[in-house]
């Protein structure tokens, strides 16, 4: 890749990842300084693997394109504009996923109230509406093993994830893979809406209408086709552009 094109790619990736942090905060899906969103950068000049991550100790609404940290696959810092390092332990799951799934340009992990609630019930996400139907038979599960500090757990997470893009970490939260940062964020927002709607619907004490397997699968394929076409096209993404415009009003400093 020519130097100019590489610089443009990295600049856009930094902008998109900073936008992801800000959007997750804006939608109330962050958890203080915990959880992470990582993005895979083009390999370094010597073929070294490089990833972008948030500086340790910053809230998601404090992340900018300029203060993102570059790390290698072990979490060792390559470039640290902010000077606070990273939570290397928090990156271990992300690193394992990135290295096992080369289609994962972005790995997004959340602990939201609705996401944790749905991850804590055996049924997981039910096909109750259009949002949740897109995930029908497309969610992996990994049983809780305690705070994810045991490096041996990474292999089990990868095995449980398989080829899926979305995982419910039982009793813990969600893990989402995107072929781009934009795709990861869109999946995360729709999964959060699905979980919130499910919690709301089941709390009414009335009889839920669960979509049939046929309708849910048809809807899931419709969503998948739309996502596939967007990733194949590359370039302009109207939905992502709309989110970026929202940030220009709500958090105009994220690109700095």
Image (spheres, helix red, strand yellow):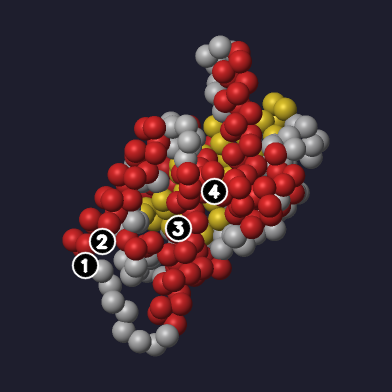
Secondary structure type for disc 4: helix
Query: Please, which residue is most extreme toward the bottom here?
Result: 205
Q: Give the residue drawn at x 32%, y 61%.
A: 133
User: Residue 8: horizontal and vertical position, in percent?
Assistant: 60, 23
Cα distance between the residues tagged 4 and 1: 33 Å
User: Residue 120: horizontal and vertical position, in percent?
Assistant: 46, 68
Secondary structure type for disc 2: helix
Vertical comparison of 152 with 14: above or below: below
Residue 228 visible somewhere in the drawing: yes
- Quadrant where the C terminus sits is top right
Cα distance between the residues tagged 2 and 3: 15 Å
The quadrant in which residue 126 appears is bottom left
| Residue pointed to by mark 2 | 216
Q: Give the residue drawn at x 45%, y 66%.
A: 195
Sequence-wise, the earlier of marks 4 and 2 is: 2
Residue 93 visible somewhere in the drawing: no
Cα distance between the residues tagged 4 and 2: 27 Å
| Residue pointed to by mark 1 | 212
In the drawing, what numbered circle is on residue 242?
Answer: 4
Of the pair 187 and 242, the residue shown nearer to us: 242
Of badges 4 and 2, nearer the viewer stands 4
């Amino acid at each position: 890749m020519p130097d100019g094109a590489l610089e443009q790619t990295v600049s856009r990736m930094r902008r998109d990842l900073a936008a992801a942090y800000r959007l997750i905060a804006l939608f109330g899906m962050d958890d203080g300084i915990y959880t992470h969103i990582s993005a895979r950068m083009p390999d370094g000049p010597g073929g070294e693997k490089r990833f972008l991550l948030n500086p340790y100790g910053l809230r998601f609404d404090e992340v900018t394109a300029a203060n993102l940290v570059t790390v290698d696959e072990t979490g060792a810092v390559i470039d640290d504009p902010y000077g606070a390092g990273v939570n290397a332990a928090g990156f271990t799951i992300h690193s394992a996923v990135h290295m096992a799934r080369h289609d994962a340009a972005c790995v997004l992990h959340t602990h939201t109230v609705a996401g944790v609630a749905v991850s804590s019930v055996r049924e997981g996400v039910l096909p109750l509406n259009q949002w949740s139907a897109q995930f029908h038979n497309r969610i992996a599960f990994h049983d809780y093993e305690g705070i994810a500090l045991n490096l041996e757990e990474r292999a089990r997470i990868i095995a449980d994830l398989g080829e899926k893009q979305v995982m419910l970490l039982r009793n813990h939260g969600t893990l989402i893979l995107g072929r781009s940062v934009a795709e990861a964020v869109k999946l995360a927002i729709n999964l959060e809406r699905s979980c919130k709607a499910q919690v709301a619907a089941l709390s009414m004490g009335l009889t839920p209408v669960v979509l049939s397997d046929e309708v849910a699968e048809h809807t899931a394929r419709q969503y998948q086709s739309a996502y596939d076409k967007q990733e194949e096209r590359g370039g302009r993404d109207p939905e992502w552009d709309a989110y970026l415009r929202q940030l220009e009003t709500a958090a105009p400093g994220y690109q700095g």
